[in-house]
Image: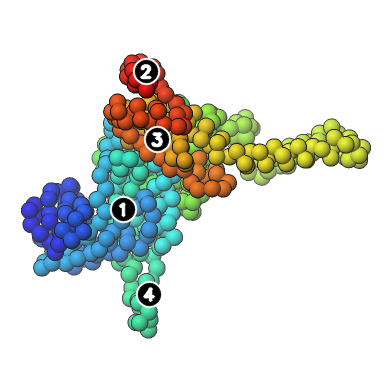
Amino acid sequence: MIGSTLKNYLVEEMLGKGGMGVVYRALDTKLNRRVAIKVLPPELVKDEDRRRRFVQEAKAASAVNHPAIAQIYEIEEEGDATFIVMELVEGSTVHQLVARGELDLSSAVEVGIQVGDALARAHEAGIVHRDIKPDNIMVTKDGHPKILDFGLAKLLDEARAPDDEAASKFETRAKTQAGMIVGTLAYMSPEQARGIPVDKRSDIFSYGIVLYEMASGRLPFDGASALDTMHAIAYEQPAPVTTIRADLPFSLQKVIDRCLRKKPEERYQDLREAVTDLKRVKREIETGASGGMPVLERVKWWFGGLSTKGMVYVGIGGVVVGAALVWMLGGGGGARSRDPFTLLLPIGVGLMIFRRVRNRGQIEVRKFVKKASTIREVRLVTFHKGEFNVVADKPTTRTYVKLNALLTAANARLYRGEPMTMIVRDGADETATRTLLQSPGVQFVREDRGGSSFFRRVRKGA
């Protein structure tokens, strides 16, 4: 295929191959852009089932619009060749990042949040991926994850024909043969391993395996043989990630545990819930408040497994005691209501809230700079007219993931105004750095170890 042309696409090099096809880098000669094309191998062209599933990949992926899902441009045929034209995603797979140790805890959680949100969007469109694994999640050079390969996707709902043919309907539900095992062994759900029908909760189990591997660097189910691995997936409990890495927060363990429940009805029923819980984990990590077992869990452990109903009673008792203390300290409310201080208090609180809302942008800039300064590759941060400029020394994927997460979080907390933007400069030369140092809005300059002499020379020259 190298050097040949399919329609208006010039094939340049092979990027990878698998059971569903071969992926090439190609040049779109009409639009002068690089794309990826996935071609069904010629020897499988006559296999009608594979051809149908190959075409379904394009339909499934193109039905979902999300920044963390690789975009499908079109599906084409030329002669006996059927191929999908898609966004060319350059970077590293999550598998490669884990193997190289380039995903720390906060980066792993951030990737998990974005991938979970994208999968939730696919599930809302009635699509089950059925092959979620680190090799099918690419992280771009600027730190954005993208889910690839919907070749095993299963459309759950009927799709309606165009309006001018509304009288007819066509079935797009994948007809996977009963008992057929589809997916990648180490990342299968128990349902897949047993060859029974699956729904979106199967993706949630596989997603939990990916979270487990990103957090611990290990697979939760890894037997000596394929049969051992399938048995472990279906029946055995994995070691808690907190026993593999002592620094992992218990809240992350809870998210992973709930994803990896053997019974589908006991898992998260919607990945939006998992994403919400992961965002709490992220806040714990950022604030340094993450730690071991929470107080309520510890109390439950002390009482040897207190039931949920018992925990509710404990909570109600705590509320009653708290309310009684407030009533006693407040003198029952009657006398305090006539105190002038009681009238001034809400006014003061209101002014404090107004001040924080008014200065929210400045607060978020300071938070961003403070957290960005803890990233060792970051040498300089400026902020002017709503845009951050970050100079980084040999930034890794982890660097970009962290910076993107900081910017997203800062914009999410803004009450008003336009969202802030960011430019990351990899290895800016002396002239560009001097220009930034002379510009308004310098927020942070690192002057330690390797970077000190360079920045002092530049600042002296300025």
Q: CA distance from mark 4 to mark 3?
A: 47 Å
Residue assigned mark 1: 70
Tell me the number on the disc at residue 459: none
Structural crowding at the residue carrying mark 2, measured as other residues with C-alpha within 10 Å and reported as few (<14), some (14–19) or many (≥20): few
Residue assigned mark 2: 460
Contact (Cβ within 8 Å) of mark 4 with mark 3: no
Structural crowding at the residue carrying mark 4, measured as other residues with C-alpha within 10 Å and reported as few (<14), some (14–19) or many (≥20): some
Tell which circle, 3 or 2, labels the residue nearer the N-terminal end: 3
Residue 295 image point, x, y percent: 62, 31
Residue at the location (27% across, 37% down)?
96
Residue assigned mark 3: 389
Residue 392 image point, x, y percent: 34, 30
Residue assigned mark 4: 160
- From the viewer's side, name the closer residue of 68 and 274: 68
Task: Report helix, strand or loop for mark 2.
Answer: helix
Task: Report helix, strand or loop for mark 4.
Answer: strand
Residue at the location (12% across, 54% down)?
11
- From the viewer's side, name the closer residue of 275 and 292: 275
Q: CA distance from mark 4 to mark 2?
A: 68 Å
Contact (Cβ within 8 Å) of mark 1 with mark 4: no
Residue 270 image point, x, y percent: 48, 54
Task: Report helix, strand or loop for mark 3.
Answer: strand
Contact (Cβ within 8 Å) of mark 4 with mark 2: no
Q: Amino acid at mark 3?
A: Asn
Q: CA distance from mark 3 to mark 1?
A: 27 Å
Tell which circle, 1 or 4, labels the residue nearer the N-terminal end: 1
The image quadrant of residue 130 is bottom left
Q: CA distance from mark 1 to mark 4?
A: 24 Å
Tell which circle, 3 or 1, labels the residue nearer the N-terminal end: 1
Q: CA distance from mark 1 to mark 2?
A: 46 Å
Residue at the location (27% across, 40% down)?
92
